[in-house]
Image (spheres, rainbow, N blue to C red):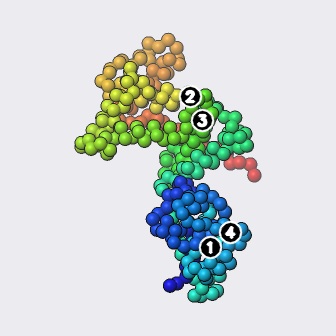
């Protein structure tokens, strides 16, 4: 039988004892070496396997054990022990027939595993000994950054720049995780964590998508939207169709959403008459609201329309600027 050196790699983001059946077989049947004690080493030992910790360079100890036992397992550390793998590969290439090297995955990262890294990094930064700036923040002091990062993500979407969008969504995620970490410092009766945020999201998505999770019958996108809104109304028990509208959003978007909510509820309220307003600012507001109402009726987005026209105007201004001095 060909001698083997099995490099057993596991995910550092999963509980230590979660190994495949093939991985458990190999650690129970053959000598196991590793570079340091860890939770994984403890789990393997508790399962009845012997693990030897190698102090120092591991290449020769591995070759010695494989020479006497035929197969040896190296329990890789969290980083995968790539340097050892390269050194072993070169040694075995220089001595053909000595042994074969096999890479075995005892566990691997599930989708979303790097989110655990994000939580761990933000926890380190916001804990004693971490980043003083982040530790000094509050939900209120970070509010502007959340808006700024969201707008930058919006810009990336508008520019169809998917690489920039990936980066900007990371900045939005940073804000979410940091807010959740700061909430862990609240008084006990107010405290919550990123798990509460994620758990609430999961529960909400399951409740509001019964056509996916509960076998509800829906035919069209309009029916799905109506079902979502019906479930949402039942959950929130709101007193008004306008409850839940974000009042701090840009004024054009706010006006559009309020008019849309009223229209969907069948509520008709006359718009303010510009000529009846007491001052110029109120008249301007009534004129703008009338313009938003006209856009809504025509199925247009006034926020997007004004943004595009303003950006076009900005380009014209840039073109009209004198060249910078040399």
Q: 165 or 120, which lies in front? A: 120
How far apart are the two marked residues, 4 and 1, measured between alpha carbons? 15 Å
Question: For mark 1, what is the residue?
Answer: 85
Tell me which label, 4 or 1, sits earlier in the chain.
Answer: 4
As measured in the structure, the alpha-carbon distance from the residue carrying label 1 to the one carrying label 2 is 49 Å
Q: Nearer the viewer, mark 4 or mark 2?
A: 4
Q: Is residue 88 above or below residue 253?
A: below
Q: Residue furthest front?
A: 48
Q: Earlier in the sequence, mark 2 or mark 3?
A: 3
Residue 50 x/y as whole percent: 59, 67
- For label 4, the crowd category at 10 Å Cα-Cα, with few meaning under 14, some 14 to 19 and many 20 or more, is some
Mark 1 is surrounded, within 10 Å at the Cα level, by few (under 14), some (14 to 19) or many (20 or more) other residues, namely: some
Residue at 49 percent across and 26 percent down: it is 247
Q: Is residue 300 above or below residue 2?
A: above
Q: CA distance from mark 4 to mark 3?
A: 40 Å
Q: Residue furthest right?
A: 326
Q: Secondary structure at mark 3?
A: loop
Q: Nearer the viewer, residue 152 or 229?
A: 229
Which residue is most to the bottom?
Answer: 96
Query: Which disc number belongs to residue 184?
Result: 3
Tell me, yes or no, if residue 245 can be seen here.
yes
Question: Residue 113, image x and y in percent?
Answer: 52, 53
Q: Position of residue 300 (x, y in %)?
A: 38, 36
Height in image: 85 above or below 325? Answer: below
Q: How far across and down, in percent of the image, does residue 196 sit?
A: 50, 37
Q: Earlier in the sequence, mark 3 or mark 1?
A: 1
Residue highlighted by disc 4: 54
Tag 4 near tag 3, CB within 8 Å: no
């Amino acid at each position: 039988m060909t001698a083997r050196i099995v490099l057993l790699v596991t995910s550092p983001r999963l509980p230590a004892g979660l190994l495949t059946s093939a991985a458990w077989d190999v650690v129970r049947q053959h000598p196991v070496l590793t570079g340091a004690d860890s939770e994984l080493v403890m789990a393997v030992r508790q399962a009845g396997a012997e693990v030897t910790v190698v102090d120092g360079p591991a290449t020769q100890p591995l070759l010695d054990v494989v020479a006497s036992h035929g197969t040896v397992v190296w329990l890789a550390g969290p980083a995968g022990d790539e340097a050892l793998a390269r050194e072993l590969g070169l040694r075995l290439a220089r001595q053909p027939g000595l042994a074969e090297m096999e890479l075995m995955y005892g566990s691997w990262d599930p989708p979303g595993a790097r989110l655990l890294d994000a939580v761990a990094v933000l926890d380190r930064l916001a804990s004693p000994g971490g980043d003083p700036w982040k530790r000094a923040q509050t939900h209120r002091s970070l509010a502007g950054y959340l808006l700024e990062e969201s707008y930058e993500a919006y810009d990336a979407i508008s520019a169809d720049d998917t690489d920039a969008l990936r980066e900007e969504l990371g900045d939005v995620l940073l804000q979410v995780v940091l807010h959740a970490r700061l909430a862990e410092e609240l008084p006990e009766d107010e405290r919550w964590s990123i798990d509460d945020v994620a758990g609430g999201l999961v529960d909400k998505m399951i409740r509001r998508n019964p056509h996916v999770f509960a076998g509800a019958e829906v035919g069209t996108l309009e029916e799905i939207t109506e079902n979502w809104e019906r479930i949402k109304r039942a959950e929130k028990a709101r007193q008004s169709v306008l409850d839940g509208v974000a009042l701090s959003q840009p004024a054009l978007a706010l006006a559009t959403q309020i008019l849309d909510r009223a229209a969907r509820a069948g509520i008709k309220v006359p718009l303010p008459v510009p000529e009846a307003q007491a001052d110029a600012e109120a008249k301007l507001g009534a004129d703008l609201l009338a313009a938003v109402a006209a856009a809504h009726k025509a199925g247009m987005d006034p926020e997007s329309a004004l943004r595009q026209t303003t950006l076009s105007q900005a380009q014209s201004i840039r073109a009209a600027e004198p060249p910078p001095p040399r």
